[in-house]
Amino acid sequence: MAQQNSTLTTALTRPGQSNSTGDARALYLKLFSGEMFKGFQHNAIARDLVMKRTLTNGKSLQFVYTGHTKAEYHTPGNSILGNTDGAPPVAEKTITIDDLLISSAFVYELDETLAHYELRGEISKKIGYALAQKYDRLIFRQIAKGARQASPITKSGFVEPGGTQIRVGTNNQASDAYVPASLIAAFYDAAAALDEKGVSQDGRVAVLNPRQYYELIQGVGSNGLINRDAQGTALQGGNGIIEIAGIKIYKSMNIPFFGSYGTKYGSASATNPGVTSPGNVGSFVGETAEDARASVTGINGNYGNSSDFANSCGLIFQKEGAGVVESIGPQVQITSGDVSVVYQGDVILGRLAMGADFLNPAACVELIAGAATGSTGNAAFGTTYPANA
């Protein structure tokens, strides 16, 4: 009997080991890493919709603008040494990395032992969600900012087009943001403005909040905008609308929306669409947009304050409209060894270092509602409505 026990002990399978040798938790750590990245990638949609660059050995990255030039007739006998007006003009935009963005949790070893579910996997996904949420929110705010900016090219006679604000609806109520016909009209208006400003049709997208998206699903089915090949869960999950005016549509709870994120509840007004709360939404739904200017610890750029987005209700943009620079991509770190022994647990950390800003204002369109005709809409970034023709 003793021999059988000994044999069983020797043949014990340790599923956390790699090839049955080494650290008994080695594969568990890799599982955590994968869960964190999955949580981030499934929730960060803005990362693939804008210009993304990786930065090493520096705090900021320079983007260069080249404006238009003109054709001119050659005078016989004159040397050709470039256009007489010195075109094309050139300007620059610098995106600075913000401080390290982290999300972490301490996992007590006894809790992990007693838990009847895989504790680290659940925590890892939530860490990925938190990083993705912040990532998207910062990028979307910069796109809204770009929609209110003039071009950095300001050479006399060569001024490039800037951003655009499009008013949804004709009333002075924020509830226009949920009217399908008004949204569709705004999309076509935005597409025309992008065409007129010379913005490529490739990579044009829009981001609306979920309620807006579902209003379109219900309201435009008879107009041929529904993909008839998308059925069931695919249709309901946000893949049903092919496009409007060549603009592919996404939905997100991270767009600036009437001073909050994703949705806003309360009585209808010029800055509130009048949606009744479904109840029990918790503290993470309809959050007020936080202040995120350079005066806030950790912020080295200008992402605006909540008041800057009092009438924002959607974004339409092309890939060149904004950029994100990463010096540290999404990473996982975890304590081990003596630290784990001392604290009888592990600190699990997800981190990244990034910065975002608008690049080409002409490629940015902000949808606004509730603002009176001819008003400045969201003018906190210093532009008029309609912006920068």
Image (tube, helix red, strand yellow):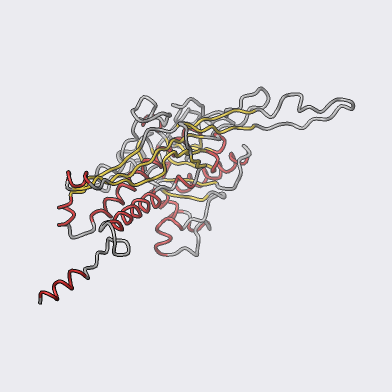
Can residue 115 be seen from the camera position used here? yes
Q: Name the residue located 52 percent from the left edge and 29 percent from the top edge.
A: 149
Q: Name the residue located 38 percent from the left edge and 30 percent from the top edge.
A: 299
Q: Outermost residue toward the left?
A: 1
What is the total number of numbered labels drawn onto the structure image? 0
Say left or right for 271 vs 379: left
Q: Is residue 241 above or below residue 324?
A: below
Between 117 and 58, the residue placed more toward the observer is 58
Where is residue 17 shown, x and y percent of the image? 28, 61
Q: Name the residue located 60 percent from the left edge and 32 percent from the top edge.
A: 65
Q: Quadrant of residue 98?
A: top left
Where is residue 60 shown, x and y percent of the image? 48, 31
Q: Outermost residue toward the right?
A: 77
Q: Quadrant of residue 88?
A: top right
Where is residue 126 shown, x and y percent of the image? 29, 49
Q: Quadrant of the C terminus?
A: top right
Between 284 and 117, the residue placed more toward the observer is 117
Say left or right for 149 vs 97: right
Q: Is residue 265 above or below residue 227?
A: above
Q: Is residue 155 above or below residue 182?
A: above
Between 24 and 170, the residue placed more toward the observer is 24
Q: Name the residue located 63 percent from the left edge and 39 percent from the top edge.
A: 198
Q: Quadrant of the N terminus?
A: bottom left
Where is residue 137 shown, x and y percent of the image? 39, 40
